Image (cartoon, helix red, strand yellow):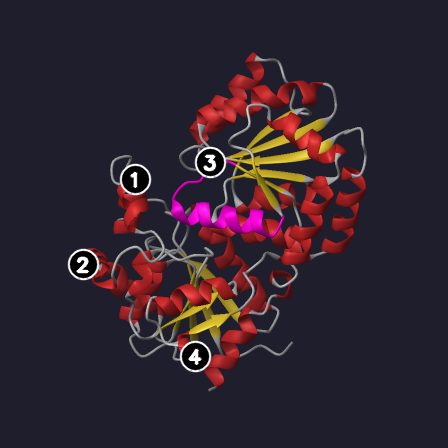
């Protein structure tokens, strides 16, 4: 395809680790249309991923004392917009250097700017007040913090429910567009063949070598919960019923779980522990028959696009509770955090063929996100 005169700056925030994935997926999707782009962490001097962020959101959500308060006040439609305006002002004042850095990047008037997190979108909107900033909402129900935003931010949302929420926040309807969630090409390639393979594997009444992917991250899916799952899956792993992969969020947790697996004498071929990165996630998703995770924004839509049956761990924040309830409503997920015997619950779903219905529902509702409509939506908007 002929290269375009436009280029893409795809902003993300490592404070919410998963947001690097849709940012990179957008670069990938624009590249197919002949538009060069880069994913960029504005809190890093060179744009590479960094967790050393000074933004207010990251400070609050990583604090064990402030996080519960944040989860309460950020609930969907709970508080009036005015209460969040000081947060916007503080975020801008704390990051004036970041805004200046973004200004230096945006000298090309043909630059397309996207963001997969509220913070970089807010800063970019102030760096480029006359340029549309396309903010992808990565949760089904956006935080209350999004109730007040600069007028040049345009919302891209994954579904009708999200659009309704944003309109109820007082946004103009012409500032909100529904388009597919940015999904990596590794999930899109040969997806139908994997769906059929998954159905054939899960149809067996006697489970054998079923690939189970377990993802940790955040409160409730850390060390204690992961060790509990290792205990519960060690027997079916040793008896060749399952092969389990744990993707964990920190180096410390990775070392801890590997040590724990050695202590209870499980082998790598039975239970494998790895770091959670985009490079490890996509192969793990495509190989898995079953996913166990909390209902984070990105993984919710990535799991649907892949077509995985989902067993949900404890919610981290009210937005994840709403994500989980949506997955359960469409029949793609069941809660696992209440079960003391998680493998027995999953095995029962295999024997009753309930898991086949979950898999089919997941794949069906992921069809929209496999279409990769976001770049065309943005380009059509810019033509008007």
Label 2 to label 1: alpha-carbon separation: 19 Å
Point out the frontmost of discs 3 and 2.
Answer: 3
Q: How far apart are marks 2 and 4 (CA)?
A: 33 Å
Location of mark 2 (residue): 86
Q: Where is residue 235 drawn, in percent x and y?
A: 66, 18
Percent across and percent down for residue 187 are: 65, 53
- Please give the residue where the numbered disc 1 appears in the rendered image: 68
Q: Any mark on residue 314, and which?
A: 3
Helix, strand or loop under label 2? helix
Characterize the local packing of mark 3: few (<14), some (14-19) or many (20 or more) Cα atoms within 10 angstroms. Answer: many
Residue mark closest to the camera, 2 vs 4: 2
Q: In which quarter of the image is residue 82?
A: bottom left
Q: Which of 189 and 82 is in front in this view?
A: 82
- Residue located at (32% from left, 61% from top): 146
In magenta, the rendered stretch is 313-331
Label 4 environment density (alpha carbons within 10 Å; few <14, some 14–19, many ≥20): few
Q: What element carries label 4?
A: loop
Earlier residue among tags 3 and 2: 2
Q: Do the residues labelled 4 and 1 touch (CB within 8 Å)?
A: no
């Amino acid at each position: 395809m002929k290269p375009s005169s436009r280029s893409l700056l795809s902003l993300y925030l490592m404070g919410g680790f998963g947001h690097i994935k849709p940012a990179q997926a957008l670069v990938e999707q624009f590249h197919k249309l002949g538009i060069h782009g880069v994913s960029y962490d504005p809190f890093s001097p060179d744009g590479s991923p960094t967790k050393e962020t000074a933004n207010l959101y990251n400070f609050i959500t990583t604090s064990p004392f402030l996080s519960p308060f944040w989860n309460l006040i950020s609930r969907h439609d709970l508080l009036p917009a005015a209460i969040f305006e000081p947060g916007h002002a503080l975020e801008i004042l704390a990051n004036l250097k970041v805004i200046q850095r973004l200004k230096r990047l945006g000298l090309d008037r043909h630059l397309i700017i996207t963001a997969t997190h509220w913070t970089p979108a807010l800063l970019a909107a102030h760096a480029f007040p006359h340029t549309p900033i396309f903010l992808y909402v990565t949760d089904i129900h956006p935080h209350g913090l999004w109730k007040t935003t600069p007028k040049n931010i345009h919302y891209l949302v994954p579904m009708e429910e999200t659009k309704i929420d944003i309109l109820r926040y007082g946004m103009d309807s012409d500032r909100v567009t529904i388009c597919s969630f940015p999904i990596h090409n590794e999930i899109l390639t040969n997806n139908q063949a994997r769906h059929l393979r998954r159905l054939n594997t899960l149809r067996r009444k006697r489970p054998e070598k079923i690939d189970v992917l377990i993802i940790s991250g955040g409160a409730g899916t850390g060390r204690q919960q992961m060790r509990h799952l290792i205990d519960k899956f060690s027997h079916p792993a040793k008896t060749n019923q399952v092969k389990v992969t744990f993707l964990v969020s920190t180096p410390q947790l990775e070392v801890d779980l590997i040590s724990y697996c050695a202590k209870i004498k499980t082998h790598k071929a039975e239970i494998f522990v790895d770091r959670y990165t985009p490079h490890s996630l996509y192969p793990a998703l495509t190989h898995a028959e079953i996913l166990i995770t909390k209902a984070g924004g990105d993984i919710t839509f990535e799991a649907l696009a892949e077509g995985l049956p989902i067993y949900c761990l404890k919610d981290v924040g009210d937005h994840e509770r709403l994500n989980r309830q949506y997955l359960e409503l469409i029949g793609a997920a069941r809660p696992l955090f209440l079960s003391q015997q998680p493998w027995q619950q999953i095995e029962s779903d295999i024997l009753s063929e309930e898991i086949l219905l979950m898999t089919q529902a997941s794949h069906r509702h992921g069809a929209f996100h496999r279409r990769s409509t976001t770049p065309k939506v943005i380009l059509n908007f810019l033509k008007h």
